[in-house]
Every structure is written in structure tokens, then in C-alpha cells.
Image: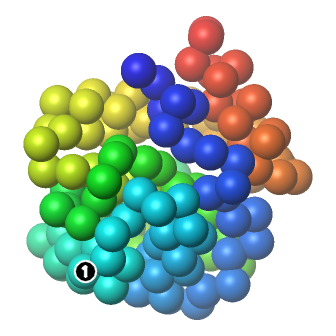
Amino acid sequence: MTVSHYLKSDYCIMDLQSQNKEEAIREIIKRISSSGRILDEEKFTKDVLERESLGSTGIGHNVAIPHARSPVVKEFMIGFAKSNKGVDFNALDGEKVNLIFLMGADPKELNLYLRILAELSKLLMNNSFRQSLLSAADGKEVLRIIEQFERE
């Protein structure tokens, strides 16, 4: 399975309004929760924030991948947000984050969770990929970009 299989254009926020990490996570979860894949939005938010407290998911290059395995997630999913202003995620390089991929999985989906996290991390190390996402106009274009780079 690929990243593009789990990210839907409806789960993409192209102009994130949140000013801080917790608000950003809540805004993305709110967008995904309409899918019915999250049984309890507040519990999942708490689980993601708890994971974040163990160490920042701001991986550098203006990217963050907040994630959690939670019993209130029915099926693996990924949400995406682009912040034009940047959000402080306490990233490893000290820079603000402009690209956020939020992942959620049922605790039983550990292998899938780790595989997709690794694949996404690999894609995000590519500067052309990140630049393409920053210039994407909508969720459909985000998916096209991901699919294109997954084929390369």
C-alpha cells in the first residue's frame, strides 16, 4: 500500500488557519473526522498530543508528521495541511512547519503504520517533492503529486 492510498483530497487543508501545534492538530483531525474513521475526535486528539509530548514530530525541512495509534481510529488514514505562515512544532531544525501530514491508525495496524510512516518520510526527504506540495492549489493536486513521486 502507498501513501496516496490513505490520503483523500477531502482530508487536505490548503490554507491551515491554526497558529500553534495543538490547534493545527485539532484542525486537521476535525477535517478527517467527517470520514467516519475516527470514533472519538477528542480522544484521538489527546492520543496525538500525547505522542507529540514524547518528542516532536517536526522532522525538519519545514515538515511535521504528527501521528498516533489509537483504539478510536477505525481504519488507517492520513490528513494533510499546508500552512502559509508556518506553525511552531518544536522541529529538530528549529524552523516553523509548512507541511503537515497527520496519521492515525488502529493499534492492530502497527506494520502498516510503520511502513507508511517510512514511505512518507522517504518522500519528504526529496526537496522537489516538498516544493511541489507547497505550490499545490488543492487536495486533488496534492494527491497527483504524491502519486507521481511514488512512481519514481
x and y, in percent, of residue 43 in the image: 25, 80
Callout 1 amino acid: Lys
Report the quarter where the C terminus lies.
top right
Is residue 67 in view?
yes
Against 6, is 54 above or below? Answer: below
Task: Write the residue at 79% across / 42% down.
Answer: 140
Task: Write the residue at 41% across / 86% down.
Answer: 22
Is residue 63 in view?
no
Q: Camera-side residue: 118 or 109?
A: 109
The residue most toward the right is: 137
x and y, in percent, of residue 105 in the image: 27, 50
x and y, in percent, of residue 121 in the image: 39, 37
Against 139, is 110 above or below? Answer: above
Label 1 sits on a secondary structure element that is helix
Against 146, is 105 above or below? Answer: below
Q: Residue 59 lies in what quarter of the image?
A: bottom left
x and y, in percent, of residue 73 in the image: 29, 59
Task: Write the residue at 81% across / 40% down.
Answer: 141
Please tell me how crowded label 1 is: few (under 14), some (14-19), or many (20+) other residues with Cα within 10 Å. Answer: some
Q: Is residue 111 left or right of residue 64?
A: left
Q: Camera-side residue: 147 or 34?
A: 34
The residue most toward the top is: 152
Q: According to the image, what is the colour scheme of the structure? A: rainbow
Q: Is residue 129 left or right of residue 91?
A: right
Report the quarter where the N terminus lies.
top left
Q: Is residue 144 left or right of residue 87?
A: right
Residue corresponding to mark 1 = 43
Q: Camera-side residue: 52 or 96?
A: 52
Task: Write the residue at 70% across / 20% down.
Answer: 148
